[in-house]
Amino acid sequence: MDKPLILQVSTDIRLELINEHHAEDLFTCIDANRAHLAQFLPWVGFMNVVADVSAYIQTCKKLQEEDKEISFVIIYQNKLAGRIGLHHIQTANRSAAIGYWLAKTAVGKGIMLNSCKKLIDYGFGAMALNRIEIKAATQNLSSQAIPEKLNFIKEGIMRQAEVVNNNFLDLVLYSMLREEWQERQSLQNL
C-alpha cells in the first residue's frame, strides 16, 4: 500500500490527499457549514448524508487516477477544516485550477492563504504545471482575497459562468504562471 500524500503547510496545517477515511469528518464539516458554503458552492445541497461524501471521494480518486484532479482535505490543529485541490488539470497545456473552501470557524487565520501557497508550490514543482487559475464569484470577496494576496493576475470576468442556487454567477478569473511564481518566491527569499 502506498503511503498517503501529505503536504505539511505549517506546524498546525497539513493537506492530506482525500481518502475514504475522511468521509465522516468531511460530511460533519459540510453539514455544520451549509449556510456559509451554499452561498457560492453549487454542490452543497447534494451532500446530505455520509454516503454522498463517500461517492464524491470515489469520484475524486477516479479523477486523480486519470490525472485530471488532485484533492486534499485541510487539517488544522488535527481537525478537518476544509478542502482544496487542483481541478481541470490539462496535462497537454500543463494547467489547472485551484478550488477551495473552509469552515466558517477557520476563516481569517491564514489557513487558506498558506494552503494555497503550498498547493501552488506542489503544482508548479512536483506536477510541472505552467499555469494555475483561481475563479471566484464577483460577490465572494473572501475568496477573491486569496489570489489578490498571492499576486495572481486578474484576467477578467467570466459572465454568468456558474449556476449556484438557481442563479447565474459571474466569476473573476485569476491566473499565475510558473515563471511569475518562481520570480516572486525568489524575491521573497532575498
Image (cartoon, grey):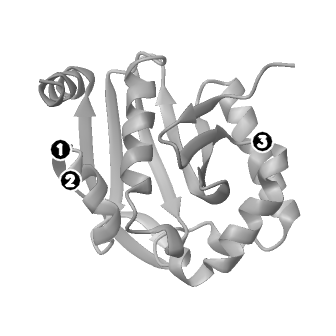
Density class for disc 1 (Cα within 10 Å; few <14, some 14-19, many ≥20) is some
Determine crowd level at label 2: few under 14, some 14-19, many 20+ residues with C-alpha closer than 10 A. Answer: few
Q: Is 6 displayed left or right of 10 in the figure?
A: right
Quarter the N terminus occupies: top right
Query: Does 136 appear above or below 133?
Result: below
Q: Earlier in the sequence, mark 3 or mark 2?
A: 3
Amino acid identity at mark 1: Asn
Q: At which x and y percent is residue 135? A: 35, 53
Q: Residues within 10 Å of mark 3 (few under 14, many from 20)?
A: some
Mark 3, secondary structure of its residue: loop
As helix, strand or loop, the secondary structure at mark 1 comes to loop
Residue assigned mark 1: 151
Percent coordinates x, y for residue 145 in the rendering: 26, 61
| Left or right of residue 128: residue 58 | right
Which residue is depicted at the point 74% across and 28% down? 4
Question: Tag count in the figure?
Answer: 3
Residue 188: image location, x then y, percent: 16, 31
Q: Are marks 3 and 1 in contact (CB under 8 Å)?
A: no
Residue indicated by mark 2: 148
Query: Which residue is label 3 attached to?
Result: 19
Question: CA separation, marks 2 and 1?
Answer: 5 Å
Asked whether residue 165 appears in the rendered view, the answer is: no
What amino acid type should be assigned to the residue bearing mark 3?
Asn
Q: Residue at x 25, y 40 (%)?
A: 175
